[in-house]
Amino acid sequence: MNPLDVFKLEGRSAAITGAASGIGRATAEVMAGAGASVVVGDLDDAGAEAVAKGIVENGGRAVAQKIDISKRAELDALVDRAVSEFGRLDVMANVAGIAADGLIAEATEEQLDKAIAVNLKGVFFGCQAAMRVMMPQGSGSIINVSSTAIDAPAARYGLYAMTKAAVAMLTKTLALEAGRYGIRVNALAPGSTITSFTLRHLQGAGGEVDQSKYDAFVDRMKKQSPLGMLGEPEDQAYLILYLASDAARWCTGQVWRANGGQAFGA
């Protein structure tokens, strides 16, 4: 037996949120490369279409779907698209999320509601939609994206970290409930990864481009890793592939970290 065969996803389908860019895009491309048929979901419909087109041009199977993950019906529609296009749903990757920077004392109710709606409810709805299909199927893998921000408190990241910590507990609890149906549920807590998500650190107080500020951020994040480097989206996508594949058949209810050994607050 070729040990690499357990990573193959031929005959399976995956629905991925936040797949127009960053970790979501890398996940869609890696899964398609492993043989999965992919539904590329994102609020950025043009970006999702471009990713799906690229996968098809490289010999894979993919379709794009515009979704707002804060709306339950749109997560249901994403899962239904996977079933209608590919006949089943084997992997649900809840990757999409938003930043929520700022001091807790200064956060508005609107900022709180938005962070919860996207970072928590969006993942919650994605899990529910996937379970609806996977339970009668008797199999499946759900992968939720949390954050290394849950591991240590950091000023100005409290609101974001709070929602991502909730994702970690959602994952652990759902794993207990889903196991009887042959469904595995895991989470990622990515370390600092260079994506469009981190580009907000390029901006100055007025929103203008500030390369020195971004360089300082990158340097600070690198110093928190014993490897002295930051991650790329593919570093997270390869871990998601593992969790989606039969290689991780005995892995559930865990929070996994591809973070270069970063120690925040050090």
Image: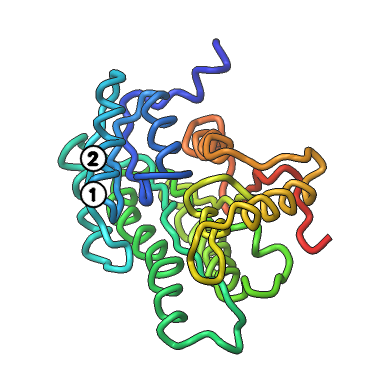
| Of 228 and 200, the residue lying toward us | 200
Q: Residues within 10 Å of mark 2 (few under 14, many from 20)?
A: many
For the residues marked 1 and 2, what is the alpha-carbon distance in whole angstroms? 6 Å
Q: How many marks?
A: 2
Q: Is residue 78 left or right of residue 252?
A: left
Q: Which residue is mark 1?
A: 45
Q: Residue at x 62, y 54 (%)?
A: 214
Q: Residue at x 25, y 56 (%)?
A: 67
Q: Is residue 195 left or right of residue 133?
A: right
Structure colour scheme: rainbow
In the picture, the quarter occupied by the C terminus is bottom right
Q: Which residue is mark 2?
A: 49
In the picture, the quarter occupied by the N terminus is top right
Q: Amino acid at mark 1?
A: Asp
Q: Residue at x 52, y 64 (%)?
A: 167
| Of 109 and 1, the residue lying toward us | 109
Q: What percent of the width, then of the height, locates residue 18?
A: 38, 51
Q: What percent of the width, then of the height, locates residue 95?
A: 44, 52
Q: Residues within 10 Å of mark 1 (few under 14, many from 20)?
A: some
Q: What percent of the width, then of the height, locates residue 51?
A: 31, 36
Taking the view exactly as shown, the residue that stands out farthest to the left is: 84
